Image (tube, rainbow, N blue to C red):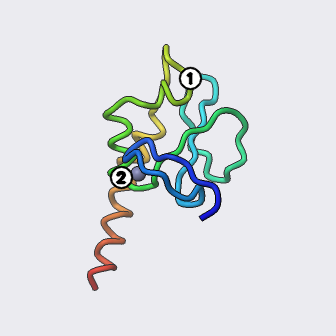
């Protein structure tokens, strides 16, 4: 499986390739789609359940060492739009 990382949503380890990398740029959560952004990163499964869990548990400030203030808007937006993608995928699985 190669390098594994822990998902902040479900707390399970998984292959780094299966996880979304998120870094803090200034005081903002940024999804590192290309895996190239420098700095401390944390990981989450790119599914609504895991992103949603991580947001509700408020684990990002601690994971990214931004205890004071961390803007997680990008993740919230992602969660909001990801539901549609995930739903579409589920429908395809059923057909
Ligand atoms: Zn997960």
Q: At which x and y percent is residue 71?
A: 48, 26
Q: In this image, 54 relative to 31: left or right?
A: left
Question: Is 85 or 16 nearer to us in this picture?
Answer: 16
Residue 31 image-quadrant placement: top right
* Label 1 packing within 10 angstroms: few (<14), some (14-19), many (20+): some
Which tag is nearer the camera, tag 1 or tag 2? 1
Q: Any mark on residue 65, and which?
A: 1
Residue at image position (48%, 52%) is 13
Q: At which x and y percent is residue 16?
A: 59, 55
The residue pinned by badge 2 equals 48
Element at label 1: loop
Element at label 2: helix
Question: Is 20 or 27 nearer to us in this picture?
Answer: 20
Q: At which x and y percent is residue 36?
A: 72, 47
Q: Quadrant of the N terminus?
A: bottom right
Q: In this image, 36 relative to 25: left or right?
A: right
Q: In this image, 18 relative to 77: left or right?
A: right
Question: Is 63 or 52 nearer to us in this picture?
Answer: 63
* Label 2 packing within 10 angstroms: few (<14), some (14-19), many (20+): many
Residue 88 image-quadrant placement: bottom left
Residue at image position (28%, 85%) is 95
Residue at image position (33%, 32%) is 57
Question: Is 52 or 42 nearer to us in this picture?
Answer: 42
Q: In this image, 27 relative to 73: left or right?
A: right
Query: Going by the picture, which residue comes out furthest to the top?
Result: 68
Q: Any mark on residue 25, and which?
A: none
First in sequence: mark 1 or mark 2? 2
């Amino acid at each position: 499986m190669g390098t594994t990382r822990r998902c902040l949503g479900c707390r399970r380890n998984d292959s780094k390739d299966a996880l979304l990398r998120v870094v803090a740029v200034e005081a903002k959560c940024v999804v590192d789609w290309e895996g190239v952004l420098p700095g401390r990163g944390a990981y989450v499964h790119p599914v609504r359940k895991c992103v949603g869990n991580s947001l509700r548990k408020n684990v990002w400030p601690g994971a990214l060492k931004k205890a004071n203030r961390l803007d997680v808007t990008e993740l919230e937006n992602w969660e909001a739009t990801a539901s549609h993608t995930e739903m579409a995928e589920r429908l395809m699985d059923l057909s």
